[in-house]
Image (cartoon, coloured by chain):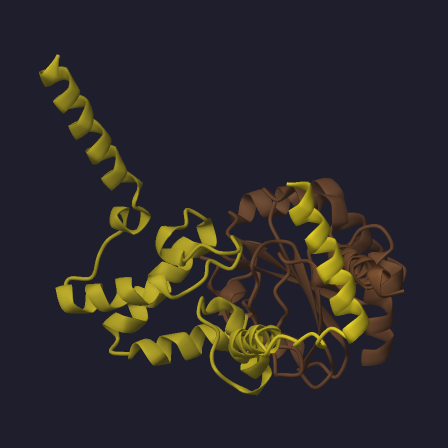
């Protein structure tokens, strides 16, 4: 039983390795460059599959883009050069992390704006509670009357 | 009165989301083209016909607006838009250049034999690299290049429905 279970675990572990896409392609001979290329692939969006990086997408175009990344890294391009090359063609959308520039100030700033709003609301609700007006003489008398009645009832 | 404030907020957000969801210009699959307003990318690829001359970016600078259509015989939406391309070429006298994307030339030619050939010139982008230079994410996509060689319009996806009348033809008029 235990043996069969172990075998199953190994089989699953191996199939997971087979699922990682970029492995099935020819890696670069230089391991340092291949690592650089692979890291870069994780930062690039597969342009047809919304939020997948080209590193883990099966799409045809993702494979083409991986090939381009490897070629350019092999040619000696820096990761920034390769990004610029792809942004020239597909725009900033191809970068999974949007760059910090004029058109994205609000995007990057919005968490702080909301944080500020929440802080403001919290601080406002924590303001010193309103102290009630002291009872007037009449009210005090009324209160004592009621309380006194209750004492008698007991 | 104040108790209606949350309702008004919720309703206006609903309206905003509904507008953004149904607005055709906000299709999340459609990446805004970044080459509009820029010179068309340079390229040189073999023609589709066996003895045809190469197709290159020089073919785009004719002083006249020209369409560049990326298609493939294996692409179903291309089949759907073919009628529009035929109308562009035949009825509106536009020059249309066809680039077969990742297709074997014989299959692409068979496709044109079957449905008609709207193209003044064709080329074979065998490995899809020219398409990437144009920022194509999938076929079909159609670009309009003006007489000076600047990309002025990109139609994402097939030209079907009122796409030809409402978008493509006005863009052609503007480019003339």
Give the quadrant of residue B60. bottom right
Query: Residue visible at 82% across and 57% down?
Result: B7
Instruction: Please state the horizontal and vertical placement of residue A37, each as a whole percent of the image.
Output: 27, 66
Q: Is residue A152 visible?
A: yes
Give the quadrant of residue B21. bottom right
Q: Colour of chain B?
A: brown
Give the quadrant of residue B86. bottom right
Q: Quadrant of the C terminus of chain A?
A: top right
Query: Residue visible at 34% across and 61% down?
Result: A42
Instruction: Please state the horizontal and vertical placement of residue A33, each as a whole percent of the image.
Output: 19, 69
Q: Nearer the viewer, residue B49 or A48?
A: A48
Q: Is residue B24 visible?
A: no
Q: Is residue B5 left or right of residue B100?
A: right
Q: Colour of chain A?
A: yellow
- Seen from this angle, which residue lies furthest top? A1
Q: Nearer the viewer, residue B87 or A21?
A: A21
Relative height, residue A68 to residue B76 (above, below): below
Instruction: Please state the horizontal and vertical placement of residue B111, each as a whole percent of the image.
Output: 65, 43
Q: Nearer the viewer, residue A65 or A38?
A: A38
Query: Residue visible at 51% across and 71% down?
Result: B44
Q: Is residue B171 left or right of residue A78?
A: right
Q: Is residue B71 left or right of residue A135?
A: left
Relative height, residue B62 to residue A35 (above, below): below
């Amino acid at each position: 039983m235990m043996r069969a279970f172990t075998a199953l675990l190994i089989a699953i572990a191996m199939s997971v390795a087979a699922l990682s896409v970029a492995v099935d392609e020819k890696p670069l001979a230089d391991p340092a460059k291949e690592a650089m290329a692979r890291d870069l692939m994780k930062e690039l969006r597969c342009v047809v599959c919304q939020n997948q990086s080209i590193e883990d997408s099966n799409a045809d175009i993702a494979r083409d883009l991986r090939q381009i990344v490897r070629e350019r890294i092999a040619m000696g391009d820096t990761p920034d050069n390769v990004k610029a090359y792809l942004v020239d063609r597909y725009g900033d959308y191809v970068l999974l992390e949007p760059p910090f520039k004029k058109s994205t100030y609000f995007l990057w700033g919005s968490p702080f704006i909301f944080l500020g709003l929440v802080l403001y609301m919290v601080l406002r609700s924590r303001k010193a509670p309103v102290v009630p007006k002291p009872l007037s003489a009449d009210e005090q008398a009324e209160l004592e009357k009621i309380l006194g009645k209750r004492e008698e009832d007991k | 009165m104040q108790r209606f404030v949350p309702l008004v907020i919720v309703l206006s957000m609903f309206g905003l989301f509904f507008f953004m969801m149904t607005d055709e210009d906000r299709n999340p699959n459609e990446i805004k083209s970044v080459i509009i307003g820029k010179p068309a990318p340079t390229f040189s690829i073999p023609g589709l016909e066996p003895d045809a001359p190469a197709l290159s970016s020089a073919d785009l600078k004719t002083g006249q607006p020209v369409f560049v259509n990326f298609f493939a015989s294996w692409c179903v939406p291309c089949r759907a838009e073919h009628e529009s391309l035929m109308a562009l070429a035949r009825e509106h006298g536009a020059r249309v250049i066809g680039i077969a994307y990742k297709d074997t030339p014989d299959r692409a030619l068979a496709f044109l034999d079957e449905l008609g050939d709207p193209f003044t010139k064709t080329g074979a982008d065998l490995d899809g690299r020219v398409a990437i230079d144009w920022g194509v994410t999938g076929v079909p996509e159609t670009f309009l290049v003006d007489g000076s060689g600047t990309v002025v319009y990109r139609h994402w996806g097939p030209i079907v429905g009122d796409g030809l009348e409402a978008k493509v033809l006005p863009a052609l008029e503007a480019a003339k």
